[in-house]
Image (cartoon, rainbow, N blue to C red):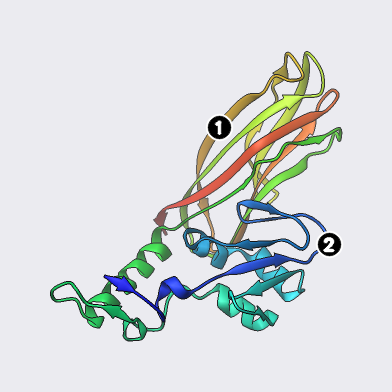
């Protein structure tokens, strides 16, 4: 089946960072003035991310549809676009028996329902970061908005190192900057020695907006972290 024009493949979502600094947009660090052509598999996360929406409002992020920059209000609507209004607007060559716009529309509706009910969201920051602060510093944040109340699986992984030999560092994962679901305070034997940590937690979350943070701090000299990843999966609804 050959799709052309009017269908989902024609939708492009590009975000340009005009904040004046490097920002983490979804799963990528984007330098000021650079653009991120968001792949389709991240569009559901893009739709849920309230921080991106807020930055479009303030024009720190500019949305482009592949042909032109969009005003902030139109840009936000474009980021929420997943599909054409109906299968009738899709142009295709029908080489399959019994394929019609009604069947295609049913598949579109089923896919939308599946993504809404069981979609996963993740964030990551791959580059190495270091801090000599004794207070926790945020490495990566996962933001979800308009979440349905239910039980969610929150997962994390990261690599860590210390500032010098035989020194302690500290790492934690928090929900909404209040509930700590993981805290790790390892000792590093050697500065250039990288170790990995990972885990998950099943948590009951209320409806609304939520944030998951992975933070780090020094205990003795400094703390270093890289390849930090967070994800959240819906397990069941209340």
In terms of image quadrants, where is residue 36? bottom right
Q: Where is residue 208 in the image (x, y as percent from the top left)?
A: 57, 65
Question: Disc 1 vs disc 2: which is toward the camera?
Answer: 2
> Could you tell me which secondary element the residue under label 2 belongs to?
loop
User: How many dots with numbers?
Assistant: 2
Question: Is residue 118 shown above or below 181?
Answer: below
Q: Mark 1 points at which residue?
A: 198
Counting from the top left corner in percent of width and height, residue 40 is at 48, 63
What residue sits 58% from the left and 45% below the top? Answer: 230
Q: Nearer the viewer, residue 131 or 36?
A: 36
Q: Give the side of residue 52 with respect to residue 147, left or right.
A: right
Q: Residues within 10 Å of mark 2 (few under 14, many from 20)?
A: few
Residue occupying the point 57% across, 39% down:
156
Q: Kindly report the distance in space between the C-alpha atoms of the residues bearing marks 1 and 2.
A: 33 Å
Screen quadrant of the C terminus: bottom left
Secondary structure of the residue carrying numbered label 1: strand
Can you tell which quarter of the image residue 61 is in? bottom right
Residue highlighted by disc 2: 20
Q: Horizontal and vertical percent for residue 92?
A: 30, 78
Residue 33, disc: none
Badge 1: residue crowd in 10 Å (few <14, some 14–19, many ≥20):
few
User: Which residue of the protein is positioned furthest toward the left in this rendering?
Assistant: 97
């Amino acid at each position: 089946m050959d799709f052309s024009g009017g269908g989902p493949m024609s939708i492009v979502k590009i975000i340009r960072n005009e904040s004046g600094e490097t920002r983490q947009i979804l799963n990528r660090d984007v330098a000021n003035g650079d653009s991120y052509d968001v792949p389709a598999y991240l569009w559901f996360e893009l739709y849920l991310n309230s921080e991106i929406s807020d930055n479009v409002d303030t024009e720190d992020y500019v949305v482009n549809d592949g042909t032109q920059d969009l005003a902030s209000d139109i840009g936000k609507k474009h980021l929420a676009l997943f599909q054409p209004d109906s299968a009738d607007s899709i142009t295709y060559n029908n080489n399959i028996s019994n394929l019609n716009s009604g069947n295609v529309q049913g598949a579109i509706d089923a896919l939308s329902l599946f993504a809404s009910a069981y979609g996963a969201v993740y964030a990551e920051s791959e580059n190495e970061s270091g801090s000599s602060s004794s207070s926790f510093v945020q490495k990566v944040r996962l933001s979800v908005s308009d979440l349905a109340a239910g039980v969610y699986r929150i997962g994390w992984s990261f690599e860590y190192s210390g500032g010098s030999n035989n020194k302690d560092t500290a790492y934690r994962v928090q929900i909404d900057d209040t509930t700590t679901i993981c805290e790790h305070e390892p000792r590093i034997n050697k500065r250039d020695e990288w170790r990995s940590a990972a885990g998950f937690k099943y948590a009951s979350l209320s409806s609304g907006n939520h944030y998951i943070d992975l933070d780090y701090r020094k205990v003795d000299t400094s703390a270093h972290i890289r390849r930090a990843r967070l994800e959240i999966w819906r397990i069941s609804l209340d």
